[in-house]
Image (cartoon, grey):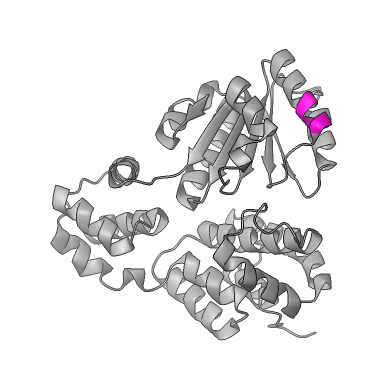
Amino acid sequence: MKLDYLQALKRVDEARGAWVLHGQEPLLEQNLIDAFRVSWQKQDIERQRYDITSVSDWKIVFNALNSLSLFSNQLAIEVHGNIKPDANGIKELKSYIQNNEQNLLLIVMPKQDSSSLKTSFFQVIDANGVNVALTANYPKDRQQILAVEAQKLGIQLANDAWQWLEQHHEHNLLAAKNSLMRVRDTFADAEIIQIDHLYACLQDQSRYSTYDLSDALLAGNLAQSIKIFQYLTDSGEPNSLILWSLSKEMRLLMQLFEQPNHALQLGIWKNKVGAYQQALRRLNPNDFLAWPSLLLRIDSSIKGLGHENTEHLIQQAIASFCGKTLFHA
């Protein structure tokens, strides 16, 4: 079964079997994953997460799916990566879907090209599971998605204000959502948000985005990366979204190091392959060993666990990505 983003949102609570989310819209991915996690917590469903870095990791996933802890009746396995199961894994996937009606396998992947969507893995998902493309290719789709975000924020926009917002952000849904948050805080008493409201507080808002941060990181430009990070922080960008961008780029670099000839299969855009390869040549692979624990410390800090400063940790991660060190022992 194929669903779009809004259809998938409505079916989160009833999701079972195998679901695949794939696309290049970070707002849609984050919203759906957050909705799933809230639903699992509400239903007392045990959650486990796995990052797929090799085909053999799928064996661990399927073993986990078929074994519940003593304290759980249902299990949700969240899998991140762009490596599909091999032939044996496809058999395991079919067997799981046919025989396990209570658990959920949620697979989160980057954007897939047309040839990938025709592989046996996606054929099994289309026939027996749920395939969710995280895309918003048309203005009507983007406005529907942002209308849901505006409703959650408790604001309404005039029709021409929607058009201005989309043009201002050049179809960047994540930046548009952040602008909705900013205009709500700036004009809390406005019944209907007009173009003048948007223009008054957003004329400089699209100067930088998390995409600009990714480009600066790949170029190894530490000064520009820190400048963009500080701008994003000052303009209200949530640290969780900045962490999402950082972890995405770090994960792609580590995967490309392991599979140097599979850039496109990993979800790297063709016109960006050179930038990633250049970043790999610049960096010491030994630095990659510290990245997972650093990302975990940032995530814990954002959630209020521990006593480390979130912004300092993010700056350390940015420096490491650029091949530099902020603090010396």
Residue 292 pos. (x, y %): 74, 59
Residue 165: give x, y in percent of width and height. 25, 57
Hey, which quadrant is residue 104 in on the image?
Answer: top right
* Residue 73 location (% of width, % of height): 71, 18
Secondary structure mostly seen in the magenta stretch: helix
The image shows residue 103, relative to residue 136, as above or below, that is above
In this view of the protein, which residue sits in the foreground, 98 or 112?
112
The answer to whether residue 58 is above or below residue 314 is above
In the image, is residue 300 above or below residue 153? below
Residue 317 appears anywhere in the view: yes
Q: Which of 149 and 108 is in front in this view?
A: 108
Q: What residue is rendered at 68% in x and 76% in y?
A: 278
Is residue 237 rendered magenta in the image?
A: no
* Front-most of residues 151 and 19: 19
Q: Quadrant of residue 114?
A: top right
Is 90 colored magenta in this rendering? yes
Res 123 quadrant in image: top right
| Total count of labels | 0
Quarter containing the C terminus: bottom right
Left or right for 243, reference 57: left
Q: Position of residue 303 (x, y in %)?
A: 59, 53
Residue drawn where x is 40% and y is 64% of the image: 236
Stretch in magenta: 87-91
What's the residue at 59%, 38% (across, down)?
Answer: 117
State the residue at coordinates (52%, 45%). 29
Viewer can see residue 301: no
